[in-house]
Image (cartoon, grey):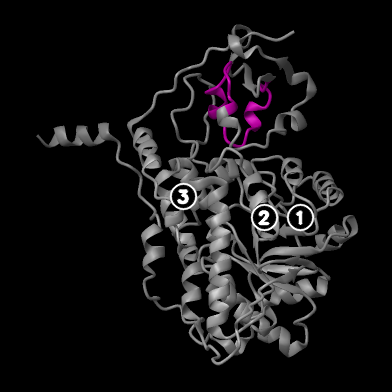
Amino acid sequence: MSLTGVEVAKHDNAKDCWVIVHGKAYDVTEFLPEHPGGQKIILKYAGKDATEEFDPIHPPDTLEKYLPKDKHKGPVDMSTVVVEKAEVLPEEEERLKRIQEMPLLEQCYNLLDFEAVARRVMKKTAWGYYSSAADDEITLRENHSAFHRIWFRPRVLVNVEHVDFSTTMLGTPVSIPFYVTATALGKLGHVEGEVVLTRSAAKHNVIQMIPTLASCAFDEIIDAAQGDQVQWLQLYVNKDRAITKKIVEHAEKRGCKGLFITVDAPQLGRREKDMRLKFTDEGSNVQSGEATDRNQGAARAISSFIDPALSWADIPWFKSITKMPIVLKGVQRVEDVLKAIEAGVQGVVLSNHGGRQLDFARSAIEVLAETMPVLRQMGLENKIEIYIDGGVRRATDIIKALCLGAKGVGIGRPFLYAMSAYGQDGVDRAMQLLKDEMEMNMRLIGATSIAELNPGLVDARGLFNHGAPPVDNLSHAVYDPLVNPAQREGVAQTKEKAKL
């Protein structure tokens, strides 16, 4: 028998808190103090339907898997639940108007075009999470601008009628040497979340890395794969190793072909843009009686389980629990690449987490240029596969990375922006644009295959010079600068009156 909305509405306070999610009622009273996002955001929906707030942040099976069964109160007759009419703020009205005025998809000619559109049409909180980076966001910008310090040395009079940029990554044949790297909370940008990326990856024959912090359930993303489509798992290591083992074993059982362990996040970086915008809305009128940290960003609120004790000593354990190739994601110096080879893992991703962790971390492309000569000198260049991510926005960036020795590159934010603005069609077009650019630029540098890309085709002498780079107008136009705290209107008015 179903519960009524009236029955659920009685449980509307911090001492007795029920919420409705996807037509079912749950008693979350005991969970309130443990919620990483603070109590207030839950109490806002005490006795009410919280589905709209729940969906972008949590996989749909979260409550079923982690809330004790005695807290599952049963189905709710949603026809009896009072639907509160949300007030549409002027800011939201303006955003909805901008959505109607969006450029045609065909007017987007490069990945930064999608970012420019997404910035105008996404909700502020979603934009804040996707676009934010650590501290002063120096590394975020350096990731992209570092590519501008590498120049080509093209070959001419080469027969480039037929160009083939297919390759393999961890043994998997792919149509082009990029993969969709792991990015959290896909439903912040699109109601279907990460499965949109799954479908596009299948269409274009590229690999998708499934994130630990996806909005969609892991099995939902796996089930969306088509045919023999290959997916990898990105793993944040849980403090409870039993949970970690269960996740890894399940991923392998479901067919994942690579385990990418994130090693650059013993603590989540401070992403101030996200912190200002996320979890700082009006909250609930219900008084919990306890102070709640309202200044967490989305990332901090969902990542408190990550183990800061993860170390090199754990690698043998990972090798013992899976036969998947193991890749360390977030390596930032050549010495650690050598340690990874010694540890016997199959790959590393040179990455600074998209500039979201340590500010003033060097770009992955610079670390790559430092690493490969050392590996070649030691005869180790074929002992491990090297990938990079961060700042890749053009096929020329991909080509530069492969010339310097990378096996492939990961691309994240651009596909989120394309998805947020134009959905499935946007991601498909973004991937096709990269393929079109790849064909053109391979011809223009005089290379007909990935095997022909080599350090002699680039001039990277300026890469290690960290002086002010030339302004990249496209990137400069879409960069959303950090802001200082907004002045409260009442305080400002009081000060003005005091002057009179």
Badge 3: few (under 14), some or many (20 or more) residues near its Cα, within 10 Å? many
Report the mark closest to the observer, 1 or 2. 2
The residue depicted at 68 percent of the width and 19 percent of the height is 24
x and y percentages locating residue 62 in the rendered image: 71, 33
Q: Which residue is at the front of the view, 429 or 27?
A: 429
Q: Return the residue at label 2.
A: 203
Q: Earlier in the sequence, mark 1 or mark 2?
A: 2
Q: Earlier in the sequence, mark 3 or mark 1?
A: 1
Residue type indicated by callout 2? Lys
Which range of residues does the magenta coloring cover? 27-51
The residue depicted at 76 percent of the width and 43 percent of the height is 223
x and y percentages locating residue 405 in the rendered image: 66, 80
The residue depicted at 80 percent of the width and 55 percent of the height is 228
Q: Is residue 381 above or below residue 102?
A: below
Real-space CA distance between mark 1 and mark 2, rounded to the nearest whole angstrom = 9 Å
Q: Are marks 1 and 2 in contact (CB under 8 Å)?
A: no
Residue type indicated by callout 3? Glu
Say what secondary structure mark 1 lies in: loop
Q: Return the residue at label 1.
A: 229
Real-space CA distance between mark 3 and mark 1, rounded to the nearest whole angstrom = 37 Å
Q: Is residue 89 left or right of residue 457?
A: left
User: Magenta span has 470?
Assistant: no
Badge 2: few (under 14), some or many (20 or more) residues near its Cα, within 10 Å? few
Which residue is situated farthest in the left direction here?
Answer: 500
Magenta span main SS: loop
> Could you tell me if residue 402 is visible in this image?
yes
